[in-house]
Each structure stands twice: as structure tokens, then as C-alpha cells.
Image (cartoon, rainbow, N blue to C red):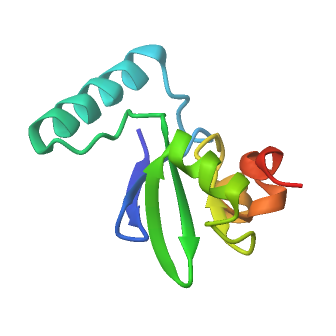
Amino acid sequence: MSSSFKIEKNQFIIIVIDEEKEVASGCSIDALGGLMREIDAEFNLGLFDRMKASFVQEGEVKTMPLQAFRSALKDGSLPQDIEVFDFSKSTYVSFLSDFLLPLKRSWAGIYVD
């Protein structure tokens, strides 16, 4: 299977599979998930914690608990000119164009006016 990975922004593991050469099977996806869980557990990374928000503020990547992120947006302690990471991308093309979005165009835009 033709695949590759990269570490983006020194924080995110991006894994890409070329499905034009070979389609990723359920077994290969499960095996990758298992390997990532082992790495996560060994290094205590919190890779599978979906209750976090990651964003760029003043050029720096920051991550905070989702509840605190929502509160900071609502009370104005977090400015609205931040960019927010969207981890729901399923293709490399969508990753390239929409992985990092302005707050109002991101999933977190619902928390601001």
C-alpha cells in the first residue's frame, strides 16, 4: 500500500494513503488505528481526545479543552481573528485547503456572533 505521513505544525500526525494504487481496507485502517493507539498510550499524547480545540493565535499553535475554548470565545478573552484546525478532513486535497480556517469559517464559528 502506498502511503506516507508527516508531522504538521510540530503537533499533528497527517497520514495519507494513495487509494488510486490500492484501496485501504477495513483491516488496514483498523491496524493503523491500533498502532496509533499504542503510540498514544506509550507517549501519553492524548491523540484521541476529541474534547480539545486547537487553533493559531498570534502565530502560535495552542490547544485547550473544548469547554474552556467555547467559554473564552463567548466572553471575548480569545480574539475572533484566530484560525482553527479542522480534523475532519478525509482527503488530502481537503486537508490542503481547509485544515486551518479562520474562526468564522470553521466548525467553531457557531460559538461567535
Residue 54 appears in view: yes
Quadrant of the rendered image containing residue 49: top left
Residue 85, percent across and down?
A: 60, 57
Q: Residue at x 56, y 84 (%)?
A: 58
Is 7 left or right of 80, judged from the image as shown? left
Q: Residue at x 66, y 46 (%)?
A: 91
Residue 17 appears in view: no
Is 29 left or right of 55, judged from the image as shown? left
What residue occupies the far left of the structure in this picture?
A: 42
In the rendered picture of this protein, how many numbered marks are placed on residues?
0
What residue occupies the far right of the structure in this picture?
A: 113
Residue 113, percent across and down?
A: 89, 55
- Vertically, is 27 above or below 91? above
- Vertically, is 38 above or below 3? above
Is 10 left or right of 112, judged from the image as shown? left
What residue occupies the far top of the structure in this picture?
A: 27
What residue occupies the far bottom of the structure in this picture?
A: 58
Which image quarter is the N terminus in? top left
70 or 45, nearer to the observer: 70
- Vertically, is 26 above or below 98? above
Q: Residue at x 48, y 34 (%)?
A: 50
